[in-house]
Amino acid sequence: MSRSTSGRSRSRSLVVFLICIAAADDAYGDLRARLHASGFTSPVGFVQDPTDRTVQFVIEQQGRVRVVQNGVLLPTSFLDVQNAVAFGGERGLLGLAFAPDYATSGRFFVNFTNTAGDTVVARFVRSGNPLVADPSSRFDLRWGGAGGPAFIAQPFANHNGGDLVFGPDGFLYIGLGDGGSGNDPGNRAQTPSEWLGKMLRIDVNVPDANPSGYQVPSTNPFLSGGPVGTRPEIWSFGLRNPWRYSFDDPAHGGTGALIIADVGQNNWEEVDYEPPNRGGRNYGWRYREGAHDNVTSIPPAFQPLVDPVHEYDHNTGVAIMGGFVYRGHALGPAYHGRYFFADLSGRVWSIAFTIDQAGEAHASNLIEHTAALGGSQLGTITSFGVDADGELYIVSYGTGKIFKVLGPGLTGDFDGDAIADLAVFRASTGAWHVLKSSTNHTTSQSFSWGLSTDTAVPGDYDGDGTIDPAIYRPSTGLWAVLKSSTNYTTSFTVSWGLNTDVPVPGDYDGDGRTDPAVFRPSTGSWFVLQSSANYTTSLGVSWGLSTDMPLPADYDGDGKVDPAIYRPSTGLWAVLKSSTNYATSLTVPWGLSTDVAVPGDYDGDGKVDPAVYRPSTGSWYLLQSSTNYTTSVGASWGLSTDVPTPGDYDGDRRTDPAIFRPSTGLWAILKSSTNYTSSIVVSWGLITDTPINRRP
């Protein structure tokens, strides 16, 4: 097997012509939410274990940190401080952060409201069991020096803040609310001697014997100037209740900026943007709420006041829940650099940031994702989280669930970057060979999974947004799936089908996971084993003739796969629509008896288009659903002996015409992202291999 990336210009042996070109209407593909874990009580945070990518921790407000491993909630808590916590309203266990050197030091920090109603930031270390903390290691940081209190006094029960985040600089950032009540009656957010209403920055990388548990970084902005009497721990002024904030993670290609979601009073919720290492700012509360004058009877501690980059009023929501700048892969490149946030009421949005020459951000292109993510299933949202790959999760307080945010799902995406990989199944050895798009086709991955008589049926069976190697064994009707969600260390099997059935896997029930399914030519019947019911229920429909070719896909754009057939004898496409509960259908004539059906979303409208490849001429004919099947696109790409392998290889959410040439192991992809003016040519595979994205 060989690989080459030198042929990215148009191959001389493959000549392109265009009948017409239609650009995608929207680069932002539909998102979806999949349940990651459930069974929590009042969850308010989701934090990745920095030492084990399979483990995340969920903060429960009443005082426990729960462990999720491979999507399963473990019975034993990582930490239980319920006896030390005042729980209720805006009080409780509110924040968790692992030290940058956690792998060696075992240190982590929590933020909670003690039984007296004051804020405690406490240090712990893990025990010999990495999934259990050592409760005896607790040390409460002492504020203002060795003789200072081991808490920050809170005059009221609300506006505790509570988040803890380590910045790219290695320092701990502590967001504190203004002390509560309404409109900050003590003007604490503008009082230099108060920690409340501020963002603090401290260095906790000190010996255990340090009596305070921290020291003040020498670069903190008010050590050498600013208002008289300013506490040295203060990083910025003028915050009302910075419940959740995050850094645009440089480890995943981010800028290092700090983005703060500050909960408003009666009128405005706001997003504040702070370029890297730009402390010393005043975000204006209480003098201003959002970008609007509020209580102006006392001047602010200093000016200028920094307005939010985004705000919304209380006709839109009630309390902002900060999220993250997305730097993962599963949602696709269009979402890179967009900031996701939510409202307590259950709405979710993202915005784009444009950074000017001064490093300041300007927000634009607000998109709401609530309906796409399931609407009411999200319940009351209290937080977001990210995993080791920068993928996004939503914390649902009322339902006690954690949801993972996924892209629309792509055929052939084994590495989770929302781009199809070059992959082959080698029946002679039962091996899968995947050339990864995430490394620009410079690295590969292989799996042994299957027998020479098995049929490759890859799909996202475990719902983690990446493709799992899977096989169907006709002799026994066995389905065997190697799970990518456990790094290919576990598998599952189900029996479904007869030896004369045709496997037609797909997400028929819309739960974000591929369902085992078969088409029975003898009766024209479809039998779907539903993953949403843990394979305990099935769906059966009659659709097709014995000579039809089954081509299931989401033709109606409802997020569920439709039973569909192509009838070569007449060139007929017939789709049974899941969006109408299989009560209506769609039929269109498109193709000749010698054509190969190659359905795909070529126009990027979220619906699969009828399309054919004509081997005799190497031509592709694509009928566009975006124009209600009134226009088409044609391209010449391939030879009569090539195998068509359409997929989204360039990550623009449109299917690309592509072929695999068995005689040479050549893959040739015509890129829709360049309006079919450039291509990718790579060698990957042997003459006897089956390309994963092949069309029958």
Image (tube, rainbow, N blue to C red):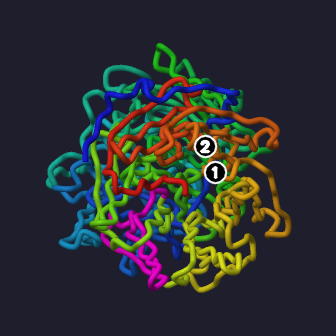
Foreground residue among 187 and 443: 443
Measured as percent of width and height from the top left, residue 562 is found at 70, 63
Q: Residue 148 — which label?
A: none
SS for callout 1:
loop
Q: Is residue 546 left or right of residue 271?
A: right
Q: Which residue is mark 2?
A: 614
Q: Is residue 478 above or below residue 63?
A: below
Residue appearing at x 55%, y 62% in the figure: 403
Number of numbered discs visible in the structure rendering: 2
Q: Position of residue 352 (x, y in %)?
A: 58, 32
In the rendered image, which quarter is residue 681 located in?
top left
Is the residue 248 above or below the residue 596 in the image? above
Give the amino acid type for the residue marked by disc 2 in the picture.
Arg
- In the rendered view, tell whether residue 274 sits above or below residue 476: above
Residue 251, position in %: x, y? 33, 39
Report which quarter residue 250 is drawn in. Answer: top left
Residue type at mark 1 is Thr
Q: Which residues are magenta?
A: 465-494
- What residue is drawn where x is 63% and y is 84%? 537
Residue 563 inside the magenta-drawn segment: no
| Depth check, front residue: 158 or 359 | 359
Label 1 packing within 10 angstroms: few (<14), some (14-19), many (20+): some
- Check contact, mark 1 vs mark 2: CB within 8 A: yes
Residue depicted at 38% across the width and 70% down the height: 482
How far is the residue under mark 1 from the one under mark 2? Answer: 7 Å
Is 483 left, or right, of 696 in this rendering?
A: left
Q: Is residue 115 visible?
A: yes
The residue that mark 1 highlights is 594
